[in-house]
Amino acid sequence: MTGWDKFLDAFFNAKVMAKYLPDIVAGTLLTIELAILIVFSGILAGLLLALVRSLSIRPLNLLIIFVVDVLRSLPPLVIIVLLYFGLPSAGWSPSGFMSTWLSLSLVLMAFSEEIFWAGITSIHKGQWEAARSTGLGFGPTLINVILPQALRLTIAPLTNRTIAITKGTALGTVVALHEILGMASSAVSNSYNPSPLILGSAAYLILFIPVVIAARWIETKYSWKR
Amino acid sequence: MEEIVDSFFNADIAASAMPIVIDGLLNTILLSLMVVPLGFLSGLGLAVMAQSKSRAVRWPLMAWVDFFRAFPPLVLLVLLFAGLPFAGLELGGFTCVAVAFMLNNSAYYGEILRAGIDSVPRGQIEAARSTGLSGAQAMIYVVLPQAIRNVMPDLLSNTLEVVKLTSLGSVVAVPELLYQARQAQSASFSPTPIVMAAVIYFLILWPLVRLLSRLENRALAGRG
Amino acid sequence: MTSIVKAYGVHKHFGHLHVLKGVDLEVAERELVFVIGPSGSGKSTLLRCLNRLEQPSSGSIEVAGIDMLSPKTDINHARQHIGMVFQSFNLYPHMTALGNVMLALRKVAGKGKVEAEQLAHAALARVGLADRAHHRPAELSGGQQQRVAIARSIALEPRVMLFDEPTSALDPELVGSVLAVMRDLRESGMTMIVVSHEMSFAKNAADRVIFMDDGLIVEQGPPAAIFDTPAHDRTRAFIGQIQQH
């Protein structure tokens, strides 16, 4: 065999790939499920926090800011490990899925709260005053006037952050979650062949490349000219 | 309550784990001092090349950036660490982290710096060139200082993410902060060392997070 | 009289747009040539072709004895001899006034730090801004910024100065200070090509006025002739329009 053939045999071994394809597909489905859950719960929680913050209740706001700061300072992997290996000592043993979902949702919550909040504060005071002067209450003003403008501003930074955090589902492999990377890694050690990793890499690209291209499109569509 | 304090904030275990954890902290700092400049410089290279008028240069660069935006850094790291030995190349955890993060960060820093360069008005280059400065001199003395300042919040934000990302080193047995904390955890059967690691990350990175939060608020407010 | 600028048959295309359609221009040493014309007439493009900020599609350009279009010409070296002042100043915002003037002195002319600083101070003094050397552009008025930009050019001791609408971006009350510096330069014997709408300055200071329209020089002559007895309808219409304002 030539070097090239050896290389192909190692990294693009059709037999190994065929054998582990079902595993990788299962891992991909799990990754998709997890990613959707994280995006949904993380962004929703972030939006809720930002809305609570707009009520300007000082002790509550200080708490929100502190929690957000903690979640932005800690590496997501540290949070996952802390939940998975730490919480059993407190009497609750979350699964790998639960730990990963909870951790990444919290992280996305923190980042999206910051982004939403920046969006809300960026809307000029005159907008509040104009709406309130027509008799709209705080809530209706926020929902009908402020948020629609703020959300438009936040869409590009939020998309980028969401991609970065949902890619973190791969971290679940550290807590025995059988998502793509977990499946691929165990397939590599079972088959003594790296082809499953290539397959897994391809799965990530198929999942995320369209999202990244969509993000690029969103960025140009909603970009701000300085 | 006492039980929780005893397991998560156990003073005895903290004291005995301290040297191990501090060792990890030093490695995390070392790792950061290596991957941040590497990523920044390779990103700078990409951003400057992206100014090319030729599509044959710009399109591959864009593909490079999108590829790494789509590819999880941990997968890249495992690919290098567990995959390359099958090609007869064993790099070791530390080198794998350096290479994986340089590739990954070149894309992120590159995209930020490209936006920064684009934000400098065309007239700046023209003024510089009209006084006889070469294209490279105009880039170095006139464009880049302004470009970097314009995207400073994004650069800092990415740097924060890079430092946090060094925790992935624990997966490939690089003895950084998280890895050392987990070693101490499995030796002591207590989550206290991991809590210590978390507290250390927080203490080190909190000032940067505060600063960023201010800068970001200001930036978005300016655009609104 | 020897010509310091010799441009013949200059064409410039931007894609399908034919912006310069064969312009011939000679400028004598110490001459002040004033270029007027409606927007889109190609006057700024002509100026930018002279120091090759724009690459002409065809034609020949020689400035101070240097063939500007030859691939053998060191364009960066050649540009030292051609100062340019822009409508939007284009000062480097991250440097002080002094830093703006010193950059090319050090990096292009290769002066040492001390000498560059002396020359830069002298140039700033010439435009009346000796006391603003350590201010950043953001701390200066528009008129002061434009004078720093002029200092940035004259510090390199150019043989020719190009002015691309130097006062168009200024508030009316600041125009005078910039024109005063330009008049001073003219009296020192600088060769100048000025694209501008400052008609009274043109009448007082210009040796020759060129009217451009649609990528061509329509007519040229002494200011009095062009402004008072223009030969072409287009010139007459343009000058009529300008004077209404």
Image (cartoon, rainbow, N blue to C red):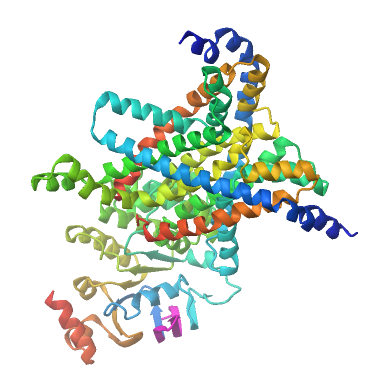
Q: Quarter-wise, where is residue C1 in the image?
A: bottom left
**C17 in the magenta segment:** yes
Image point 34% across, 29% down: which residue?
A64
Viewer-proximal residue among A136 and C67: A136
Image point 46% across, 70% down: which residue?
C53
Viewer-proximal residue among A184 and C245: A184
Magenta span main SS: strand
Q: What residue occupies the far right of the structure in this picture?
A: A1
Image point 26% across, 79% down: which residue?
C38
- Find residue C225 and report its horizontal and vertical position in percent: 21, 86
Q: Quarter-wise, where is residue C148 in the image?
A: bottom left
Residue B143, compared with residue C38, is above or below; it is above
- Find residue C2 and report its horizontal and vertical position in percent: 43, 80
- Note whether residue B58 is visible: yes
Viewer-proximal residue among C131 and B158: B158
- Find residue B33 and report its horizontal and vertical position in percent: 60, 34
**A212 in the magenta segment:** no
Q: In the image, which residues are magenta?
A: C1-22
- Find residue A193 and report its horizontal and vertical position in percent: 79, 48
Q: Quadrant of the C terminus of chain C?
A: bottom left
